[in-house]
């Protein structure tokens, strides 16, 4: 193993790489020319609402866990230890809450765009604000998704960086625009299997190169890469149990609770039960993906130790470490480097294709269709043209990502924390607080975005102007005599702790979602009470989750187990609400009072805004 030697693809690597890309493209083309041939918006945007839970769960995981996790997480673990692994704790609440609160609300309203909810709950202005914010968020995030595999390809093959960016964006744009959501989902399934296979192959070969599992454990333990639970409450510390386990919950809710790309998959399920089950099944998929990425980081450390290829100047960025490691470890195994690079490239396509499809959906449903009447054929054609257009727009954003002085992983999560947090707060304001009104929602969202960019951009500029790199989390070795993880407290010199605005800008990026969403809720409630809270009769049925009633019912069943066979006291269902001049009739039944809205197939979205 020669770390300084050149790393090149063999012919076999190129062939395998090309075959996997062709396979991904073929899946998209297959669904473009079979079935309904994507001739309706329901088929193109929602796969005829006939998807099963298994492919949906893999697609849900692949959408935001692709190239960013494969490249970013191992590099993070190699540099700073396994503290990041504790983000897996946030997956529990981060998926249970969407499964039992957000999915039932959205599915029973029979939405096409998640931002239709904002009009039902508040008004059209709030809906447009949410849609525009989401478009801004996803366009920036896709820049990360396009740039990541291009950077990897450039590092290991010398392929021109911006040529790779163009290839990534154009390939993904074509099969997304032709095959629709069904092609995106099944391509995600294929790419997820390839991704897991590639990671597992690298780990197995890396462990052999390092001398076996026991040798790997000794090296990472002695090197301080096995982290204990860091219970330091300081929110400026980059990674602790609180930032990852608690702050990560808000990040997960912004991804799997209210993001259009994920909600669109829930809504494409055949039944609400399958939508909830797909959310459950994401949990083991995410845990497997996190485990493989963290293990790869540990194997990298076992092979290189403190002689980082970055410090040896073999690579220019730590985000290139994973691909350098793959080419270094697998250079004697023809085909495997091509397999891994192809899985990375394909995994990135899953993120980009999901973004293009969801961007086309919200633009058509929220911004175009309510104002212009058109035939079904024309609406479908326009949806495909929108997907193509967003592909071109997102290509330009890759250059902005190239200029960011941050790791790929942190950049991606920061973007979702900065913009996804206020959107999460907006939906929580509507779902959990019946008193919130439209004025409070708009001003709350504006306040959340203002705080988000103040902290995010301020912190970015502060890091740019400072030559001092903030210390990473210290790690605690776990000895064989005491493998129980113990709580540790990082000793921080008070004189070196940032104060004032510097302390505010030093907030861990994992707290961005929590800070920004909380700002929206607090400001939104204050403004709502100042301008007159919404009355219960003015709230559309099914748009508010009955937290008090659900808690009371659960408590009633826990205190009196025999009462589980009886129904809770009936509650009054909100009356109809007038939207855009159309009065929605309430389909209240005694069964609806048991929850908050029945799961019958009657649409609760006005016909004007549905495609």
Image (cartoon, rainbow, N blue to C red):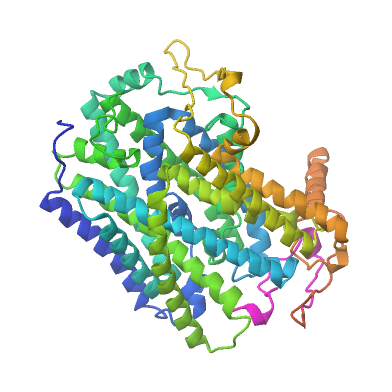
Q: In this orientation, which residue lies closer to the viewer: 347 or 102?
A: 347
Q: 599 above or below 60?
A: below
Q: Is residue 290 left or right of residue 551?
A: left
Q: Is residue 570 left or right of residue 6?
A: right
Q: Is residue 128 visible?
A: yes
- Which quadrant does the C terminus fall into? bottom right
Q: In this orientation, which residue lies closer to the viewer: 426 or 290?
A: 426
Direction top: furthest residue:
481
Q: 481 above or below 247?
A: above
Image position, residue 578 (x, y; %): 79, 77
| Span shown in magenta | 584-611
Image position, residue 423 (x, y; %): 63, 56
Q: How many marks?
A: 0
Image position, residue 577 (x, y; %): 80, 74
Image position, residue 148 (x, y; %): 35, 51
Q: In this orientation, which residue lies closer to the viewer: 462 or 440?
A: 462
Which residue does the image show at 38% across and 30% down from the upper left?
79
Which residue does the image show at 59% across and 69% down from the upper left?
113
- Which quadrant does the N terminus fall into? top left
Secondary structure mostly taken by the magenta-highlighted segment of the chain: loop
The quadrant where residue 336 appears: top left
Q: Is residue 114 visible?
A: no
Q: Is residue 266 left or right of residue 143?
A: right
Q: Is residue 199 left or right of residue 57?
A: left
Direction front: furthest residue:
465
Q: Is residue 226 magenta?
A: no
Which residue does the image show at 81% across and 56% down from the upper left?
527
Q: Is residue 591 magenta?
A: yes
């Amino acid at each position: 193993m020669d770390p300084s030697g050149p790393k090149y693809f063999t012919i076999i690597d190129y062939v395998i790489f090309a075959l996997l890309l062709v396979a991904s493209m073929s899946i998209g083309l297959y669904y473009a020319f079979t079935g309904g041939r994507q001739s309706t918006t329901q088929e193109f945007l929602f796969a005829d609402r006939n998807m099963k839970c298994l492919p949906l769960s893999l697609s849900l995981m692949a959408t935001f866990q692709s190239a960013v996790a494969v490249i970013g997480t191992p590099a993070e673990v190699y540099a700073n230890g396994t503290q990041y692994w504790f983000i897996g704790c946030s997956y529990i609440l981060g998926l249970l809450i969407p499964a039992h609160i957000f999915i039932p609300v959205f599915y029973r309203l029979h939405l096409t765009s998640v931002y239709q909810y904002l009009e039902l709950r508040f008004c059209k202005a709030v809906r447009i604000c949410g849609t525009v914010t989401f478009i801004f968020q996803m366009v920036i995030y896709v820049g990360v998704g396009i740039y990541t595999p291009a950077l990897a390809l450039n590092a290991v093959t010398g392929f021109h960086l911006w040529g790779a960016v163009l290839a990534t964006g154009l390939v993904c744009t074509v099969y997304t625009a032709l095959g629709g959501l069904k092609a995106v989902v099944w391509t995600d399934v294929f790419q997820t299997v390839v991704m897991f296979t590639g990671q597992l192959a690298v780990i197995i070969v890396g462990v052999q190169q390092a001398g076996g599992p026991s040798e790997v454990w000794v090296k990472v333990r002695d090197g301080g890469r096995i982290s204990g639970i860091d219970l330091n409450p300081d929110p400026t510390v980059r990674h602790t149990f609180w930032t990852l386990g608690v702050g990560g919950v808000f990040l997960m809710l912004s991804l799997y609770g209210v993001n259009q790309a994920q909600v669109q998959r829930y809504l494409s399920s055949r039944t609400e039960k399958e939508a909830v089950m797909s959310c459950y099944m994401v949990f083991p998929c995410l845990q497997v993906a996190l485990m493989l990425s963290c293990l790869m980081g540990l194997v990298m450390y076992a092979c290189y130790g403190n002689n980082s290829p970055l410090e040896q100047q073999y690579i220019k960025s730590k985000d290139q470490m994973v691909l350098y490691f793959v080419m270094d470890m697998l250079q004697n195994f023809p085909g495997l480097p091509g397999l891994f690079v192809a899985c990375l490239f394909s995994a990135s396509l899953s993120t980009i294709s999901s973004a293009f499809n969801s961007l086309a959906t919200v633009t058509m449903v929220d911004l175009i269709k309510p104002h212009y009447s058109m035939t079904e054929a024309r609406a479908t054609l326009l949806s495909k043209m929108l997907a193509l257009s967003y592909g071109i727009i997102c290509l330009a954003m890759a250059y902005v990502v190239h200029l960011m002085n941050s790791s790929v992983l942190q950049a991606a999560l920061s973007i979702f924390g900065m913009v996804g947090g206020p959107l999460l707060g907006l939906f929580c304001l509507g779902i959990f607080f019946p008193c919130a009104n439209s004025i409070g929602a708009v001003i709350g969202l504006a306040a959340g975005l203002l705080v988000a960019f103040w902290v995010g951009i301020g912190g970015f500029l502060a890091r740019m102007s400072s030559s001092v790199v903030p210390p990473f989390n210290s790690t605690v070795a776990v000895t064989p005599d005491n493998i129980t993880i113990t709580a540790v407290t990082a000793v921080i010199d008070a004189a070196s702790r940032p104060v004032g605005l510097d302390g505010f800008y030093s907030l861990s990026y994992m707290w961005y979602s929590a800070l920004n969403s909380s700002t929206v809720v607090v400001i939104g409630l204050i403004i709502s009470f100042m301008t007159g809270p919404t009355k219960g009769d003015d709230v559309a049925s099914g748009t508010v989750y009955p937290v008090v009633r659900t808690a009371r019912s659960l408590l009633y069943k826990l205190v009196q187990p025999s009462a589980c066979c009886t129904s809770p006291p009936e509650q009054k269902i909100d009356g109809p609400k007038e939207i855009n001049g159309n009065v929605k009739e309430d389909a209240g039944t005694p069964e609806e009072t048991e929850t908050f809205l029945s799961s019958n197939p009657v649409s609760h979205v006005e016909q004007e805004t549905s495609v």
